[in-house]
């Protein structure tokens, strides 16, 4: 059988449980989801070119994925912290920096894509 549907079903359940955990326990994840919703609304209202829409969706997925990876690795680091001390803090800082860099890049790309639409709106 090419697909083991019960296994696939459980995989989706685990993934949804991870999203639920991130939503409930990670403020930064909620902030990124809210920012993503704003971008999706802007996409629906302003209807940018298909290429720009796909780029924005890819960036949203990238930032949210990186935030989830950050959360997972922070949890592992928390387990190791008593033994690794200083490097645990450095790891967490580096992970947070990675999310910050991707978020700032996403913001810049979003502004570049939406800027002409904002200018047109202001001129009306």
Image (cartoon, rainbow, N blue to C red):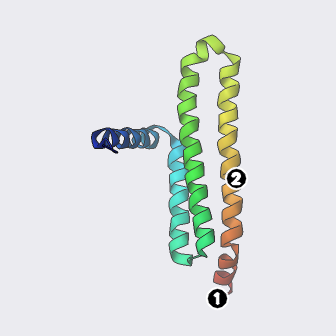
Q: Is residue 71 left or right of residue 20?
A: right
Q: Quadrant of the N terminus?
A: top left
89 or 14, nearer to the observer: 14
Q: Residues at badges 2 and 1 in contact (C-beta under 8 Å)?
A: no
3 or 106, nearer to the observer: 3
Q: Quadrant of residue 5?
A: top left
Badge 2 density bin: few <14, some 14–19, many ≥20, Cα 10 Å:
few
Q: Which residue lies furthest to the top in this view?
A: 83
Note whether 66 is above or below 81 in the view shown.
below
Query: x, y percentage for residue 74?
Result: 57, 29
Q: Looking at the image, is mark 2 or mark 1 earlier in the sequence?
A: 2
Query: x, y percentage for residue 119?
Result: 70, 79
Residue pictured at 57% horizontal, 77% vertical: 46
Note whether 69 is above or below 61 in the view shown.
above
Q: Is residue 53 left or right of residue 5?
A: right
Residue pictured at 36% horizontal, 43% vertical: 12
Label 2 SS: helix
26 or 9, nearer to the observer: 9
**Label 2 – label 1 distance at C-alpha:** 29 Å
Query: x, y percentage for residue 66?
Result: 59, 43
Numbered label attached to residue 104: 2
Residue pictured at 67% horizontal, 49% vertical: 102
Label 1 SS: loop
Residue pictured at 62% horizontal, 11% vertical: 83
Numbered label attached to residue 20: none
Q: In which quarter of the image is the C terminus?
A: bottom right
Q: What residue is shown with label 1?
A: 124
Note whether 113 is above or below 20 in the view shown.
below
Note whether 74 is above or below 34 in the view shown.
above
Q: Residue furthest bottom?
A: 124
Query: x, y percentage for residue 90?
Result: 71, 26
């Amino acid at each position: 059988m090419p697909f083991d549907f019960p296994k696939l079903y459980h995989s989706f359940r685990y993934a949804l449980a991870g999203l639920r955990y991130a939503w409930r326990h990670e403020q930064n994840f909620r902030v990124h989801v809210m920012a993503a919703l704003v971008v999706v609304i802007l996409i629906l209202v302003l209807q940018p070119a298909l290429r720009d829409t796909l780029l924005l969706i890819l960036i949203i997925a990238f930032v949210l994925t990186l935030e989830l990876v950050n959360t997972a690795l922070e949890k592992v680091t928390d387990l190791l912290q008593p033994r690794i001390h200083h490097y645990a803090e450095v790891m967490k800082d580096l992970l947070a920096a990675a999310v910050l860099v991707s978020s700032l890049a996403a913001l810049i790309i979003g502004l570049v894509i939406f800027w002409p639409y904002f200018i047109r709106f202001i001129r009306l």
